[in-house]
Every structure is written in C-alpha cells, then in structure tokens.
Amino acid sequence: AQKITQTQPGMFVQEKEAVTLDCTYDTSDQSYGLFWYKQPSSGEMIFLIYQGSYDEQNATEGRYSLNFQKARKSANLVISASQLGDSAMYFCAMRGPSGGYNKLIFGAGTRLAVHP
Amino acid sequence: EAGVTQFPSHSVIEKGQTVTLRCDPISGHDNLYWYRRVMGKEIKFLLHFVKESKQDESGMPNNRFLAERTGGTYSTLKVQPAELEDSGVYFCASSQDRDRARYTFGSGTRLTVV
C-alpha cells in the first residue's frame, strides 16, 4: 500500500531564511509521482511542485525545490528565502498505479509559520 | 481562466438532514475528483469522474453519499442523511491530462453536521 508520512506537524522559520519540510513515502511501484500542495488560510489547495520517479533532476519551481532521494524514499520540499505569505499548511502527496493512478495519497500536512 | 469553483463554502446542517455540494471544474477538464479531509485526518480520495462517467468510486465511504456529474460539466455530491462523522472539508479537483498530473483544486466546502 502507498503511504505518505510528514513527521513535522508544525514548523517555524524566520523571514528570508530557507526551510525544509520533510516527506517520506512508501510504495512498491516503480513509476510514481510526488506532489506538494500549499493550503493557505483561505482554504484552496495550491499546486507547488511535481517530481516524477524517473526524473533524474530535482524539480524546481521558483523558490520551491524538491529534494528527491529515491533510495531513501524521501521527497522533502525546500522553500528558499521564506516570505510571510508562505505561512500555510503544506501537504505532500503521491500517485502511482498500485494506489489507483487516479488517486492522490496525502500526508497529514505540516503547518508552516513564517515570522518577521 | 476561471479556477475550480465549489459552493457553498460553508454548510452547517443537523444530523439526519441532506446536503448537496457542488463543484464546477475548469472548463474543458474531463477529469473531476472529490476528496475530503475529516478533522485531524489526512485528505482522502472519494471518487473520480471522466466526463460524466464514474471512473473510480472506491473512496466513497458508504451509500449515504451520492455523486453525479450531469453532462460531464459540474458535479454534485449529496450526503443523505448526514451523520456527525461526515463533518470535514470536501475538496473538488479537476485535470485535463491525468498523466501530467496538474490537478487544480477548489477552495473546498466546510461541512459541519451538528
């Protein structure tokens, strides 16, 4: 079965510093996708970044990068130069054939607070 | 491009009543998904439509939940009768290309059953 584990219920970071949000996953699939979503207080789920299991390079999207370590089954999100607007819930998710390729499997989330 | 729209944004109903949630996907997105997050738990998949057909409804918790997608456009999720454990946030998402995995989520409907 597929599983996503986010071990940090809450994180604090100073504005302009970098922060890493942890995500580990468990799957027997060879082909799978990993996602990070942001949920601000307004409620919408905002797609941040995607990493395919066969992508050789770590995904990057602006200030977001995904530190993909396949052998360790980790897909940590790195936010560089944190901003106050980064304060939100962050969810790691995965998708793969064994879980039903249509479904995203989510972790419990990490609440990030950015302090000025 | 308009995003995924869900309404109502909040709903408070009494146990035993019926509630209908609506989702308008992004125009042209054939794939529509429902997810929910019950308090304190992970976001869980409910079901997936491709156009008007249910592709996968393995996440629907029980037969009190009924989802429809009329003409492959908007979708409704009806809970009848609602129970206390149905409280949570119900998200809808849509995508145009499943392989690219670019799901766009709505803001969710917060359902409270009292």
Image: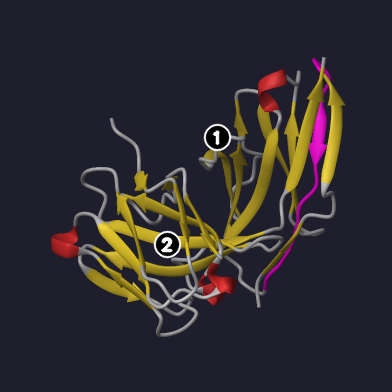
Q: Residue at x 37, y 67 (%)?
A: B48
Secondary structure under the numbered disc 1 in the rendered image: loop
Q: What residue span does the magenta drawing correspond to?
A: A15-27
- Residue furthest toward the left? B71
User: In the image, what residue type sits under mark 1?
Assistant: Ser
Residue A23 magenta-drawn? yes
**Residue A30 percent across, percent down from the top left:** 61, 68
Quadrant (top left, top right, bottom left, bottom right) of the N terminus of chain A: bottom right
- Compared to residue B45, the image places residue A82 above or below, namely above
Relative to B2, is A72 on the left or the right? right
- Compared to residue B94, the image places residue A57 above or below, namely above
**Residue A37 percent across, percent down from the top left:** 59, 43
**Residue B39 percent across, percent down from the top left:** 66, 60
Relative to B101, is A116 on the left or the right? right
Mark 2: few, some, or many residues within 10 Å (few <14, many ≥20)?
many
Q: What residue is pinned by disc 1? A: A42
Mark 2 and mark 1: Cα distance apart in space: 19 Å
